[in-house]
Every structure is written in structure tokens, then in C-alpha cells.
Image: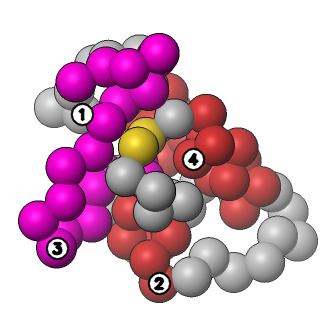
Amino acid sequence: VVVDHAVAACFDGAFVDGDLTGDGVVDFRDEDLLKELIKHNAREPTDDELQAGDLNGDGTLDHKDWLLLKQLLAGKSLD
């Protein structure tokens, strides 16, 4: 479901890929948070942020995850 260029997230107790803010929507707020978290000298992500934001599954938040989040925001799948 796309709402104003935001991807609505459905919860069944699992984390939603890209929803770093945990508000149920993957949108620019998640992108802003991810960009802050991958900056040099940024705070460590919470476990929830890491689980939702580690889109390539390598155990870290980095530029690769940001590129994948941009893909999600453009309405494309991660496959």
C-alpha cells in the first residue's frame, strides 16, 4: 500500500523492513533516522533500529542499507 510516497507497514509482531522509527510506516522519517545513524560518530542504533534498518542482513547499518531503503521508498521490492 502506498500513501503519499510512504509505504504502509503491516504488523504481526515482526519487524517491518525499513521502519526504523517503529511507527508502522516506511517513509522519509525512517530515511532521516538511518542517515543520522550511519554518520561518523553517530550513536549506536537500538536493537529495534538495527533489526528494522539492516536491510541487507550484514549486521550493521551503513550506506548499503540506505540505498535499499531508497529502493523501498520508490515502491520497489528488495528482491
* Residue 32: percent from left, percent from top: 70, 44
Circle nearer the N terminus (3, 4): 3
In the rendered structure, which amino acid carries the disc numbered 1?
Leu
* Residue 28: percent from left, percent from top: 61, 34
Q: Which residues are magenta?
A: 1-19
- Measured in 3D between alpha carbons, the distance from the residue under mark 2 to the one under mark 1, in whole angstroms, is 21 Å
Q: Residues within 10 Å of mark 4 (few under 14, many from 20)?
A: many
Give the residue pinned by disc 3: 13
Give the residue pinned by disc 2: 47
* Vertical position of residue 20 compared to residue 35: above or below: below
Circle nearer the N terminus (4, 1): 4
Which type of secondary structure does the marked residue at label 2 adopt?
helix
In the rendered structure, which amino acid carries the disc numbered 3?
Gly
- Measured in 3D between alpha carbons, the distance from the residue under mark 2 to the one under mark 4, in whole angstroms, is 15 Å
| Residue 8 included in the magenta stretch of the image | yes
Disc nearest the viewer among 4 and 1: 4
Choose between 69 and 6: the one closer to the eye. Answer: 6
* Residue 68: percent from left, percent from top: 42, 35
Disc nearest the viewer among 3 and 4: 3
- Measured in 3D between alpha carbons, the distance from the residue under mark 4 to the one under mark 1, in whole angstroms, is 16 Å
Q: Residues within 10 Å of mark 2 (few under 14, many from 20)?
A: few
Give the residue pinned by disc 4: 30
Instruction: Give the left or right position of residue 28, taking residue 59 as reference.
Output: right
Q: Residue at x 37, y 71 (%)?
A: 51
Q: Are dots 2 and 3 in contact, CB under 8 Å?
A: no
Give the residue pinned by disc 1: 78
Which type of secondary structure does the marked residue at label 1 adopt?
loop
Which type of secondary structure does the marked residue at label 3 adopt?
loop
- Measured in 3D between alpha carbons, the distance from the residue under mark 2 to the one under mark 3, in whole angstroms, is 15 Å
